[in-house]
Image: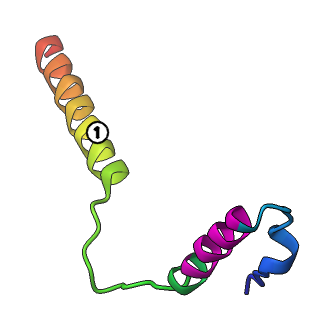
Amino acid sequence: MYNFTTNRVVKTKNANKRKSLKNILNEYKLKMNSFHPKGDSPNIFVNKLEYRMKHYYNLYKSKNDIMK
């Protein structure tokens, strides 16, 4: 598991900047382990791969049909 500490990361002398960075890091820590496996996610890579393979197969099939 990833150990995330704000004391090492936030090293600025400006109080407003330090407070802002700590707020951002605290919000990140709350959300970094949220994972919802039931939600559907678009699998763009697989969809594009499937399209390319179908296109390639159709080209290959049509090329073989011409040669016969």
Residue 54, image x, y percentages: 21, 39
Look at the picture and state if 46 lies above or below 39: above
- Find the residue positioned furthest to the front: 15
Q: Main secondary structure of the magenta part?
A: helix
Is residue 64 in the magenta section?
A: no
Q: Which residue is mark 1?
A: 53
Residue 18, image x, y percentages: 73, 68
Q: How many marks?
A: 1
Residue at the spot 87% in from the left edge and 74% down from the top edge:
8
Look at the picture and state if 11 lies above or below 34: above
Look at the picture and state if 46 lies above or below 51: below
Over which residues does the magenta segment extend?
Answer: 16-27
Look at the picture and state if 59 lies above or below 29: above
Q: Quadrant of the N terminus?
A: bottom right
User: Along the line of sight, which residue is nearer the eye, 9 or 53?
Assistant: 9
**In the displayed structure image, the side of residue 33 where residue 6 appears, left or right:** right
User: Along the line of sight, which residue is nearer the eye, 63 or 4?
Assistant: 4
**In the displayed structure image, the side of residue 1 where residue 51 appears, left or right:** left
**In the displayed structure image, the side of residue 35 where residue 59 appears, left or right:** left
Residue at the spot 29% in from the left edge and 68% down from the top edge:
41
Q: Quadrant of the C terminus?
A: top left
- Find the residue positioned furthest to the top: 67
Q: Amino acid at mark 1?
A: Met
Name the quadrant containing residue 36. bottom left
Residue at the spot 21% in from the left edge and 31% down from the top edge:
55
Say which element carries label 1. Answer: helix
Name the quadrant containing residue 25. bottom right
Is residue 23 in the magenta section?
A: yes
Residue at the spot 84% in from the left edge and 79% down from the top edge:
7
Residue 35, image x, y percentages: 44, 84
